[in-house]
Amino acid sequence: MPATTSPAELYRHSLRLLLDKDIPAWVGLWAERGVMEFPFAPPGWPERLEGREAIAAYMHDYPDRIDLHDFPDLKIHKTTDPGTIVVEMRGVGRVVATGIPFDMTYIAVVTVRDGRFTSYRDYWNPLAVRTPGLDFTGSSAR
């Protein structure tokens, strides 16, 4: 994506890549020193990922765990900082290991600089990780 891409356009593009299960391309949208945070992470789950490599390791087997079908109810809000957006959305699909439906509501605060994600604070429901097949605490998630 060109550096002139708005944060909202970059975010929408990132969702398309997740639906396409193109994790390498999704990781490629991140700045080298980008930071992903999970303020509501349950014990044993990562709270902060620093750098593109750590984010790539965390997301590596995401499609093997969650088969995403859609992101309905997407709302992107601008902030007073033109590089920062607040996103409300749902991710729906199925848990690969069990086949049960996946339906998660998210709020994210996302900052983009020079056409790349530099900060992503992901506020999601930690109770949902009690669902079998959604354990991201393994070696690839650290």
Image (cartoon, rainbow, N blue to C red):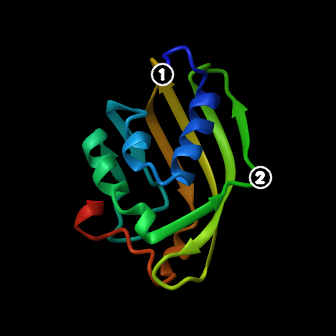
Where 85 sits versus 54, above or below?
A: above
Q: Nearer the viewer, residue 42 or 74?
A: 74
123 left or right of 63? right
- Image coordinates of residue 4 in percent, x first then y, are 55, 14
Q: Nearer the viewer, residue 16 or 138?
A: 16
80 left or right of 33? right
Residue 91's image quarter? Answer: bottom right
Q: Secondary structure at mark 1?
A: loop
121 left or right of 68? left
Q: Secondary structure at mark 2?
A: loop
Q: Which residue is mark 1?
A: 115
Work out whether mark 2 precedes mark 1 in sequence or the reverse, and give the earlier one.
Answer: 2
Q: Nearer the viewer, residue 7 or 110?
A: 7
**Mark 2: few, some, or many residues within 10 Å (few <14, many ≥20)?**
few
- Image coordinates of residue 105 in percent, x first then y, are 66, 61
Image point 64% across, 30% down: which residue? Answer: 8
Q: Amino acid at mark 1?
A: Gly
Residue 141's image quarter? Answer: bottom left
Q: Amino acid at mark 2?
A: Asp
13 left or right of 29? right
Q: Nearer the viewer, residue 53 or 125?
A: 53
Image point 57% across, 40% down: which residue? Answer: 109
What is the number of the mark on residue 73? 2
